[in-house]
Image (cartoon, grey):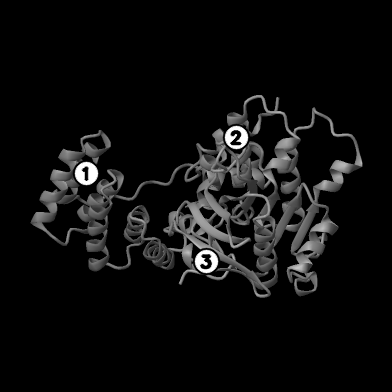
């Protein structure tokens, strides 16, 4: 009897160096059992995104029937090394105070004891004493700038202190020293950002929206939420060569393109604005699907959306996706347990490994709720709110970044300008 995905992933997690993200990548590459994985070569595994040659060798080696090589003769340990091992053992048993005392004694006796300084940094990092951890790792890199694990430690501490630019440079340094440093590679991949091309917004977001985030774009009717998201995807395709998908549940593809053309977003300027496996920009017309036949109440629309996006990603590729809109999607869905079902919907969106924009109307008595069920704002990684304010018989637009994980950003609202040059945030 074949095993389901969850069972196989649990087996993969027992392999050396394989965490959940690596396990999912291996499974997605077609290795749906340990038996299949055992037949893979090192070259096969390194072709999978995120699997380094070092990790591939470890996985292949774990299936080898050959005898373990004879261990090399151990050199005699110094008294300091023996004492440090005692400190590490104490820490492993939860006695971090005693462990830290031993480590500090060793450093007091020899301020250049790199091993003790590394352990000190690791202890403080684990105890969430991030500035103290950073100080310890700084001492290590001053003594020996070629220790990649010290640079990773500095990067982790700086990330926790919300000093993301410096953290990124540390991870880059670690990867330059050791290209097989999986942690540094993963952290840099996590910190990759998509530019919005909205003038002034990328500066607010430390360079753009973190990749693989699920972001709510919220506002009242008429606040240009759809145009805002379409503009970002259009520019990503036109200026950055990114592959993007705009999934419309309300407007037909033709209507959507006509409207965007009036905003100056002509498909001629982005040769990728076609539904084709030869183009980068894919406009998916779900509205047409709704008109073609009777809509059955038995259809799992949340699951169908995920499956369709996954299919388009596999066929065309995708860096960013916009779903327009949550209200339209919810109108097709009968929820039995909204909190639970939406939690898994958001998690499946994250599993697509693309940046997702979810367009949402404001709800609640005072229109201060960012999603129909009031849980979307907690499930999302980011919230961009476009609000309208009436002044002198005119509705002015203002943009605020309410939330954006892994990003230091202002929380003020700024005028949002839309003209022949596109969208722009005025901060002066």
SS for callout 1:
helix
Query: What is the number of the mark on residue 373?
Result: 2
Instruction: Calculate the distance from the C-alpha at mark 3 to the C-alpha at mark 2.
Output: 29 Å
Residue 202, which numbered label? 3
Q: Nearer the viewer, residue 219 or 277?
A: 219
Label 1 with label 2: CB-CB less than 8 Å = no
Locate residue 39 relative to residue 191 in the image: left or right: right
Residue lying at the far right of the rendered structure: 292
Residues 145 and 42: in front is 145
Depicted 218 relative to depicted 1: above or below: below
Front tag of 3 and 2:
2
The residue that appears at 57% across and 40% down in the rendered structure is 376
The quadrant holding residue 134 is bottom left
Q: Say few, some or many: other residues with alpha carbon within 10 Å of mark 2 (under 14 / 14 to 19 / 20 or more).
A: some
The percent coordinates of residue 178 (x first, y second) are 42, 63
Helix, strand or loop at label 3? It is helix
- Residue 85: image tag: 1
48, 241: nearer the viewer: 241
Rendering coords of residue 386 (x, y %): 58, 55
Q: Earlier in the sequence, mark 3 or mark 2?
A: 3
Q: Is residue 19 left or right of residue 136?
A: right
Q: Earlier in the sequence, mark 1 or mark 2?
A: 1
Query: Going 70% across and 37% down the picture, which residue do you hit?
Result: 330
């Amino acid at each position: 009897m074949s095993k389901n995905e969850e069972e196989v992933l649990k087996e993969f997690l027992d392999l050396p160096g394989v965490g959940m993200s690596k396990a999912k990548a291996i499974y997605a590459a077609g290795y749906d059992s340990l038996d299949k994985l055992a037949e893979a070569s090192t070259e096969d595994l390194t072709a999978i995104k995120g699997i380094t040659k070092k990790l591939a060798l470890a996985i292949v080696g774990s299936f080898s029937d050959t005898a373990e090589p004879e261990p090399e003769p151990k050199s005699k340990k110094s008294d300091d090394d023996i004492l440090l091992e005692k400190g590490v053992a104490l820490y492993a048993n939860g006695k971090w105070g005693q462990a830290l005392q031993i480590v500090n004694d060793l450093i007091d006796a020899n301020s250049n004891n790199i091993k003790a300084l590394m352990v000190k940094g690791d202890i403080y990092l684990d105890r969430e004493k991030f500035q103290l951890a950073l100080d310890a790792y700084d001492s290590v890199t001053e003594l020996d700038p070629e220790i990649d694990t010290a640079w990773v430690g500095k990067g982790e501490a700086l990330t926790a202190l919300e000093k993301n630019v410096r953290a990124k440079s540390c991870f880059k340094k670690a990867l330059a020293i050791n290209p097989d440093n999986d942690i540094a590679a993963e952290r840099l991949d996590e910190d990759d950002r998509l530019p919005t091309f909205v003038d002034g917004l990328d500066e607010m977001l430390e360079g753009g929206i973190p990749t693989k985030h699920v972001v709510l774009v919220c506002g009242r009717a008429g606040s240009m939420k759809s145009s805002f998201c379409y503009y970002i995807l259009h520019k990503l395709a036109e200026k950055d060569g990114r592959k993007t998908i705009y999934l419309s549940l309300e407007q037909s593809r033709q209507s959507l393109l006509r409207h965007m053309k009036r905003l100056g977003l002509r498909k001629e300027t982005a040769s990728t604005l076609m539904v084709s496996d030869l183009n980068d920009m894919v406009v998916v017309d779900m509205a047409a699907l709704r008109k073609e036949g009777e809509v059955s109440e038995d259809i799992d629309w949340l699951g169908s959306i995920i499956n369709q996006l996954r299919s388009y990603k596999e066929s065309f590729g995708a860096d960013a996706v916009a779903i327009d809109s949550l209200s339209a999607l919810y109108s097709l869905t009968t929820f039995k347990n909204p909190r639970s079902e939406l939690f898994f919907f958001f998690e499946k969106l994250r599993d697509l490994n693309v940046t997702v924009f979810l367009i949402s109307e404001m709800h609640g008595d005072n229109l201060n709720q960012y999603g129909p069920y009031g849980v979307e704002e907690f499930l999302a990684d980011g919230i961009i709110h476009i609000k309208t304010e009436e002044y002198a018989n005119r509705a002015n637009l203002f943009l605020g970044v309410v939330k954006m994980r892994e990003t230091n950003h202002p929380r003020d609202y700024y005028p949002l300008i839309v003209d022949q040059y596109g969208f722009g945030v005025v901060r002066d």
